[in-house]
Image: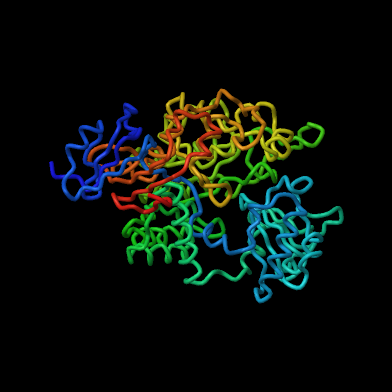
């Protein structure tokens, strides 16, 4: 064997291979993993030009992968009116006012990141926005991007009045007189968002570059961008062709609910052009439903009112079910992976039904279809993930008793549904495959936070130790696998990445301590010190 280019030694090398083996050192040659073993064994592979890095008892893992994010748009969003770091109506309004004063030349104030539980009943109103910005239109999406808060000027420009009907798949929130209050749900958001100036090519490229540098600093070298519009695909392709795309990205192309079957040919052409360098646009993204906070998630049982009585509301479908089934079947027949947003238990069941019907019509293949989020899943459907080969693409950070669960979810869903919140352990025990995605910028992409919550089922940063359905906890090894080989499998990257095995690409992350020696709260103190992509150092902390 030729001498190694790089040896990482004196660490805990958790390979995430089938045996979950642990070694002391790893050797890298020509961008790939040459061998793993003891420090003595790997030292024998050193040559005169070999760089040897003592990781000083730190942890070496396959680099993390994010199975569901909005990479480019989240990166660009960091330059807008970003409310992710503020909390509560007063704090948001101060930040909006400050942003407007700092950007007097911007014709629109655009951004987002606020939480539904920041406002009574999850409804933010235009009069609050008007009090801080009235001379320009303002539209700010919720952190989950399923609702938008607009001021009066934005509503006027969109022509939204009391006489405006709710669009298909959307809802305009209204007061007791039927007048719009400034809150737009789901497809109703587009009435305003379609008017917002779009970032130009240079702004998109800058956002994407910023985002990938951030991901590399977190130890993430690959991701699925869950929704790639044509203009963002163009930016991805430009960076990929120029060798500037540092992350391995699987792009998901949206099936637009306002259009028909004619878009399939366009998606096939976009797949062809979007397969270049480290970019692969091989999935089609569908939305079955919305979110629980605004009562648009599709549920099997009726939503409850404030007194616990059934309302007769079951959520809001983004497509008629027959249309969804037809579109999915045609995309599956064309060889696409299918990625369906499914929050409610009815959305999960019907999405599994649709994927089962597509397989029956087209034949089973290694499709790696996936359902995103899976907040609720009826017990009868848990085993279907394994039976159908459908991946549960989930965000562990959300599986904790924070305000959006305690105030906007549990009081308004049936007890049967509440007992199935984020059933990660159940899906795994039934043989299903988990892939961890952050949904950034909805929530942090930091893997330390995702792992800590998956293991503890509570917020590691607060004093609230009460877990959410503790039977659904995952052990640390399983959680790491979902954030590495599981996410790689979902993106068809598992042959080359996701575990530390000879012959695979040296996509690696080094932490300054071994997480297995810590309690979940301690994961947040661990520091990424090195990120390697194909054997090249893509990020190094100060001193490394």
**Residue at image coords 38%, 64%:** 239
In which quarter of the view is residue 45 placed? top left
Where in the figure is residue 85, as x and y percent of width and height?
Answer: 64, 52
Residue in the foreground of this view, choosing between 26 and 180: 26
Q: Is residue 402 above or below residue 261?
A: above
Taking depth in this image into account, of 489 and 318 the one nearest to the observer is: 489
Residue at 61 percent across and 53 percent down: it is: 145
Residue 70 visible within the image = yes
Q: Which quadrant does the N terminus fall into?
A: top left
Q: Position of residue 282 (x, y in %)?
A: 38, 52
Horizontal placement of 1 versus 211: left or right?
left
Question: Residue most toward the right?
Answer: 177
Residue extending furthest left?
Answer: 1
Residue at 61% of width from left, 66% of height from top?
A: 194
How many dots with numbers? 0
Q: Residue furthest bottom?
A: 105
Q: Is residue 118 left or right of residue 215?
A: right
Residue 255: x and y in percent read 49, 55
Q: Position of residue 72 (x, y in %)?
A: 49, 59
**Which residue is located at x 29 percent, y 50 percent?**
534
């Amino acid at each position: 064997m030729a001498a190694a280019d790089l040896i990482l030694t004196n660490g805990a090398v958790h390979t995430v291979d089938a045996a979950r083996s642990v070694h002391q050192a790893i050797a890298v040659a020509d961008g790939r993993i040459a061998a793993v073993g003891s420090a003595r064994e790997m030292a024998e592979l050193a040559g005169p030009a070999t760089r040897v890095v003592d990781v000083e008892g730190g942890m070496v893992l396959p680099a993390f992968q994010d199975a569901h994010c909005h990479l480019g748009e989240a990166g660009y969003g960091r330059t807008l009116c970003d409310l992710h770091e503020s909390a509560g109506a007063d704090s948001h309004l101060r930040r909006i006012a400050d942003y407007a004063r700092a950007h007097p030349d911007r014709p629109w104030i655009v951004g987002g990141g606020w939480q539904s539980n920041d406002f009574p009943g999850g409804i933010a109103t235009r009069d609050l926005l008007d009090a801080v910005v009235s001379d320009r239109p303002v539209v700010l999406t919720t952190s989950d991007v399923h609702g938008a808060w607009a001021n009066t000027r934005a509503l006027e420009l969109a022509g939204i009045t009391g006489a405006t009907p709710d669009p298909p798949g959307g809802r305009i929130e209204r007061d007791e007189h039927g007048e719009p209050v400034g809150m737009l749900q789901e497809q109703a958001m587009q009435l305003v968002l379609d008017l917002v100036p779009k970032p130009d090519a240079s702004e998109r490229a800058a956002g994407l570059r910023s985002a990938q540098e951030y991901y590399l600093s977190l130890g993430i070298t690959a991701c699925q961008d869950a929704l790639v519009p044509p203009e963002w695909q163009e930016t991805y392709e430009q960076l990929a062709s120029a060798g500037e795309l540092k992350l391995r990205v699987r792009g998901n192309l949206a099936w637009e609910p306002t259009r028909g079957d004619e878009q399939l040919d366009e998606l096939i052409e976009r797949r062809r052009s979007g397969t270049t360098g480290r970019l692969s646009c091989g999935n089609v993204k569908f939305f079955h439903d919305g979110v629980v906070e605004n009562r648009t998630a599709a549920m099997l049982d009726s939503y409850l009112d404030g007194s616990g009585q059934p309302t007769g509301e079951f959520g809001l479908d983004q497509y008629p079910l027959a249309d969804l089934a037809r579109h999915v079947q045609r995309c599956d027949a064309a060889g696409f992976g299918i990625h369906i947003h499914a929050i409610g238990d009815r959305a999960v069941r019907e999405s599994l039904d649709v994927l089962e019907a597509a397989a029956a019509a087209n034949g089973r293949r290694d499709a790696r279809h996936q359902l995103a989020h899976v907040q609720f899943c009826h017990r009868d459907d848990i085993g279907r993930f394994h039976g159908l080969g459908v991946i549960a693409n989930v965000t562990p950070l959300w599986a904790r008793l924070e305000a959006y669960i305690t105030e906007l979810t549990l009081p308004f869903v049936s007890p049967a549904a509440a007992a199935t919140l984020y059933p990660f352990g159940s899906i795994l025990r039934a043989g299903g495959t988990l892939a961890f995605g952050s949904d950034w910028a909805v929530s942090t992409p930091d893997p330390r936070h995702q792992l800590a919550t998956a293991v503890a089922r509570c917020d590691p940063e607060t004093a609230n130790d009460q877990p959410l359905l503790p039977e659904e906890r995952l052990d640390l090894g399983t959680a790491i696998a979902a954030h590495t080989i599981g996410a790689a499998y979902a993106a068809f990257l598992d042959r080359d990445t996701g575990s530390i095995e000879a012959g695979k690409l040296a996509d690696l992350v080094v932490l300054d301590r071994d997480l297995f020696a810590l309690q979940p709260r301690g994961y947040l103190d661990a520091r990424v010190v090195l990120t390697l992509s194909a054997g090249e150092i893509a990020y190094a902390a100060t001193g490394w």
